[in-house]
Amino acid sequence: MSRNIELVIFDMDGLMFDTERIGHLAWERVAAKYQFSYSIDITKRFIGRNYDAIMAVLKDAFGENAPVELWHSESWKERKNIFEENGTLGLKPGLIEILNFFKEMNIKMAVASSSRHSDIVSHLQHEGVNEYFDFVIGGDEVKESKPNPEIFLKPCEALNILPENSLVIEDSYNGFLAARAAGIPVMIVPDLVEPKEDVLKEAAGVFPSLHEVRSYIEEFLCLVK
């Protein structure tokens, strides 16, 4: 990892907000409504994937003729219901602190999420963190979903920053693979899925929360005496 970090690229779901758990609860409600069997294992297969990849997972799990588009649409209605019930997406511990840290350091920040661009912007605005970010890209703006590196390379290109002077913070395995393919160091904060062996070996670090990520980067940049 470079000591000249100019850009930090955040994943969103499961890293910034507790939306992976909300999404799973929404799918459980839809499954109960339409009477099909659903499990956390299917949710885990979604993580880090865009709409097209999620459709492929659903068809693989339930068959080509299953009404997966309807179920997916219903799951998003349920997500919105849960958001309204909770009044928040659930900010992950340490999020505001690490955003303020990078802002104070004049390090640019981007969001690169497999969610749709409009949903990302809506979520950032809802939680009052949209003004921290210099660039936002969604899964509907790339040709291929993570683990393809495109979604991480585009912020670098747009902000004219070399991948080696960037840092990705992710929670998913597909995000790890995408960052590795992009040549960008990646730190992992696991959410629903425990990190695999190659993540533990090759990531710039695996941390229990964003609090520890911030502390590590402070020390790495020799800011803590």
Image (tube, grey):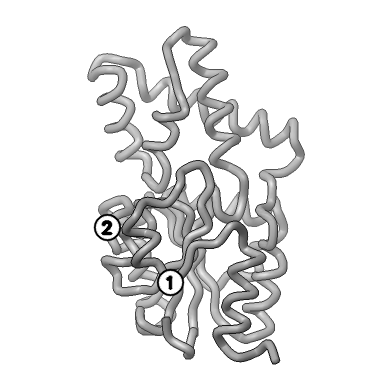
Tell me the element at label 2: loop
**Horizontally, is 173 left or right of 126 in the view?**
left
In percent of width and height, residue 101 lies at: 67, 77
Q: Quadrant of the N terminus?
A: bottom left
Q: Position of residue 27 (x, y in %)?
A: 51, 25
In three-dimensional space, the C-alpha distance between marks 2 and 1, rounded to whole angstroms, equals: 19 Å
Determine whether 131 is above or below 48 in the image: below
Q: Which residue is mark 1?
A: 204
Vertically, is 30 above or below 41? above
Instruction: Check whether the beta carbons of the residues at disc 2 and disc 1 lie within 8 A of each other.
Output: no
Residue 120 tag number: none
Res. 136 visible in picture: no
Quarter of image, res 147? bottom left
Question: At which x and y percent is residue 199?
Answer: 37, 59
Q: Which residue is mark 2?
A: 148
Instruction: Mark yes or no: residue 150 visible.
Output: yes
- In the figure, 219 relative to 200: above or below? below
Q: Which residue is drawn at the image coordinates 54% and 40% (left, top)?
A: 20
Residue 194 shown left or right of residue 77 in the figure: left
Q: Residue at x 47, y 59 (%)?
A: 170
Image position of 59 with respect to 122: above or below: above
Near mark 2 (Cα within 10 A), the count class, few <14, some 14-19 or many ≥20, is some
Quadrant housing the C terminus: bottom right
- Choose the circle earlier in sequence order: 2 or 1: 2
Q: Position of residue 113 (x, y in %)?
A: 45, 55
Q: Amino acid at mark 2?
A: Asn
